[in-house]
Image (cartoon, rainbow, N blue to C red):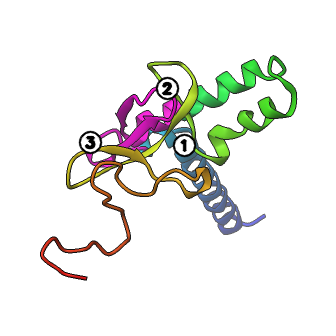
Amino acid sequence: MKKSDVIKLAVALALFLGAGLWFFRGQSLGDDDIPDDPSSASFWMCKDCGHVQTLTDRQYDDQRQLTISQQLKDKGEGEGEEHMRMGRAATLMHVLICPKCGKVAAMAAVKCPKDGEFFIDRLDLRTPNSCPKCGWSRGRPQKSDSAEG
């Protein structure tokens, strides 16, 4: 083998190893990419006890992992198909464990910009898609107080 071929092979091997290290380093540090600042926060409300919490993306991911691991730990201790359906809740419906009551019932919530009331805005649960106090709804045109209809 010529010296130039050895150099080309060494450079190609170094580039290949460098790309592999860069890829796997990025995979192992994935948690660092999840924001933990207030600008990434979202509201979560327990549909059973009404507790509201604010979670950053990092806190949400931690809670989601906790919910999934708890459901996997409890798997088999439930009552048949109903338990298996709830076992998928954290991944399919984004339901978290409520820190107040401990039930898997905390869901993404909306804070009404008019009166600050929290509500769960989920069509799949047939819950009201508007503020229970004033009727405000995300994505719907709002009637003006002065408009006659």
Q: Is residue 20 left or right of residue 50?
A: right
SS at badge 3: helix
CB under 8 Å between discs 1 and 2: no
Three-letter residue code for mark 3: Pro
Disc 1 crowd, CA 10 A, few/some/many (<14, 14-19, 20+)? few
Residue at mark 1: 25
Q: Is residue 73 left or right of residue 54?
A: right
Span shown in magenta:
34-63
Determine the image quadrant of residue 104. Answer: top right
Disc 2 crowd, CA 10 A, few/some/many (<14, 14-19, 20+)? many
Residue 126, percent from left and from top: 58, 53
From mark 1 to mark 2, how far is it between C-alphas? 34 Å
CB under 8 Å between discs 3 and 1: no
Rendered residue at 62%/46% (across/down):
93
User: Dividing the image into 4 quarters, which one contains the C terminus?
Assistant: bottom left
Residue at mark 3: 38
Q: Nearer the viewer, mark 3 or mark 1?
A: 3
Disc 3 crowd, CA 10 A, few/some/many (<14, 14-19, 20+)? few
Rendered residue at 65%/62% (across/down):
12
101 to 108, vertically: above or below: above
